Amino acid sequence: MVAFWRLKSALEYIDSLPDSEEHHLFSFQVSQAGGRKFQVSRLDEFWNSYRDMEPKYYYEVLRSGAKAKLYYDIEFYSNLNPSKCGHEMVKRLIQLNIQKLTEIGHETDETQVIVL
């Protein structure tokens, strides 16, 4: 993993790597004033450091034209929705996403979904 103060430097670094498609760019907060750095790493490297980190103020930087994955951070307050089943609502959201993605030409299915 390598970190940079400037986005341009991080992008140039990724482009210089022979296996650049395996590297991802993340942004993270370094000060309460909003200062950020940019980290380049493979997903396995990132996950190994991120999973035990607190607080988790990291964001993936998506490059224009690059393939991307959808991420949802869903919060469900059962006390405000006593008649709803959160797990069923998530399953329905996944079904609707798969349906819409298929309609626009991106074939996918439940095997491409990770629920944490």
Image (tube, rainbow, N blue to C red):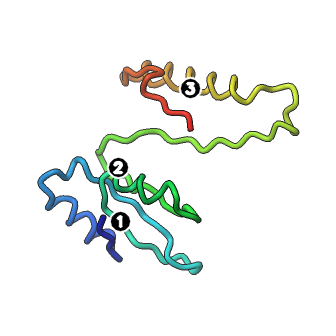
Q: Residue furthest left?
A: 18
Residue 51, given in percent of the width and then of the height, sits at 50, 54
The foreground one among 109 and 104 is 109
> In the rendering, which numbered label is found on residue 44?
2
Residue 110, given in percent of the width and then of the height, sits at 48, 21
The foreground one among 7 and 89 is 89
Q: Alpha carbon of mark 3 to alpha carbon of mark 1: how far? A: 30 Å
On screen, 18 above or below 77?
Answer: below
Quick one: label 1 or label 2, which is nearer the N terminus? Answer: 1
Label 3: which residue?
A: 94
Q: How many marks?
A: 3
Q: Which mark is in front, 3 or 1? A: 1
On screen, 50 above or below 69?
Answer: below
Label 1: which residue?
A: 39
On screen, 114 above or below 18?
Answer: above
Q: Which amino acid, by three-letter code, is at mark 2?
A: Asp
The foreground one among 90 and 8 is 90
Quarter of the image with the N terminus is: bottom left
Q: Which amino acid, by three-letter code, is at mark 1?
A: Gln
